[in-house]
Amino acid sequence: MLIMENTALAPFTTFGIGGPARWFVEAASEDDIAEAAGWAREHGVELFVLGGGSNLLISDAGFDGLVLRVGLRGIETASAAEETGQTIYHAAAGEDWDGFVERVVQGGCAGIECLAGIPGTVGGTPVQNVGAYGQEIASVIESVRAFDVEQHAFQEFTAAECGFAYRRSRFNSSDHGRYIVTCVNYRLTPGGPPTLRYADLQKAFANREAAEGTPTLAEVAAAVRRIRQTKGMLLVEGDPDCRSAGSFFKNPVVAEVELKRIAACGDKDPPRFPAGPGPENAGRVKVPAAWLIEQAGFAKGYTLGAAAVSTRHTLALINRGGASAQEILALAGQISAAVENRFGIQLEMEPVMVGF
């Protein structure tokens, strides 16, 4: 296993921001992961696991520890229980997520077609409980295999044991930094219908003739990618709006009774969406952070030095070219303060912060 020193991290991120890693290693197998974790423990240095680099902001000083980049590859399928008729996909953590979605869709399995176009790797999806356009990873997870850094052993987690909530799991909350995901097993539905709950998707197919029938999984996935591109949320070479970490803020989940107070603080009633399944979301709704940001006075294209709000989507902060991590955080701080001053809501940042 080759451990390198003072390796630039910015090229491994979609933001294109950040200083170097004191030590850096690529893991191509589970044995590599165990060895790297053991090396970090033996040398008394902090360990950070890097996947696709699409949901993090690295400090300008970099990371004074060992960065472990997960490069495990491989996808296999197996039949699930006969009574369900579903298929289990075993995907290694280093597989490109959008490539995996495309393979599943081409295989005729429903369950993640609305998650097309999301940058990053398979291993990051259960950590963040990735969701978009009416689907969420928690609904299709069968199990997650991970390396326990504390016990120095591999462990399997059922979906119930992952502690999924909105953009959360045990892996980024109660057990943050303890587990390194190596494989994710997804339970998907062969021949299942696409999910068309989200307004943007319904609009995309509104003029579809009845004779054309229900959109196929491939058509829905393609529509999602087009929608993401209009919002600067699809990685396109040379597009400055793509130098981001995607949605920089989480959509706040509030009690329904809060909506009247929020409306009174603004010029119009706020949009609202279901908070999600589960008893913990009873009487609660999701308010779009993008709407709050716009109402607080930040329009698309607003700039602060080399940092800016995307010209296509208010929820994304971008690197216009040569931006520092401090500039991104300064812009995020301005936005957060303005939203809290106007609506009394504290926005929560979504990217992982590294080296701060």
Image (tube, rainbow, N blue to C red):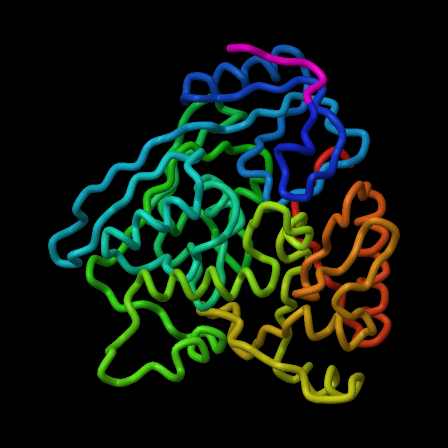
In reply to whether residue 5 is colored magenta, the answer given is yes
**Vertical position of residue 66 compared to residue 88: above or below:** above
From what the image shows, is residue 316 above or below residue 28?
Answer: below
The residue drawn where x is 72% and y is 52% is: 318
Report how many numbered discs are placed on residues in the image.
0
Where is residue 343, by image quadrant? Answer: bottom right
Residue at (68, 44) in percent of width and height: 15
Q: Position of residue 125 (x, y in %)?
A: 47, 47
Quadrant in the rendering for residue 337: bottom right
Q: Could you say where residue 172 lies in the image, as x and y percent from the top left?
A: 58, 44
- In front of the other: 190 or 144: 190
- Locate residue 61 relative to residue 45 in the image: left or right: right
Of residues 12 and 163, the one nearer the viewer is 12
| Residue at 29% over, 84% down | 209
Identity of the residue furthest to the left in this view: 82
Queried whether the magenta region covers residue 349, the answer comes back as no
Name the residue at the front extreme: 238
Q: Looking at the picture, tell me which residue is in the foreground, 53 or 234.
A: 234
Residue 150's spot in the image, x, y percent?
54, 25
Which image quarter holds the C terminus?
A: top right
Residue 267 x %, y %? 78, 88
Instruction: Report the side of 10 relative to 144 (left or right).
Output: right
- Report the residue at 76% width, 29% height from top: 19
What segment is highlighted magenta in the picture? 1-7
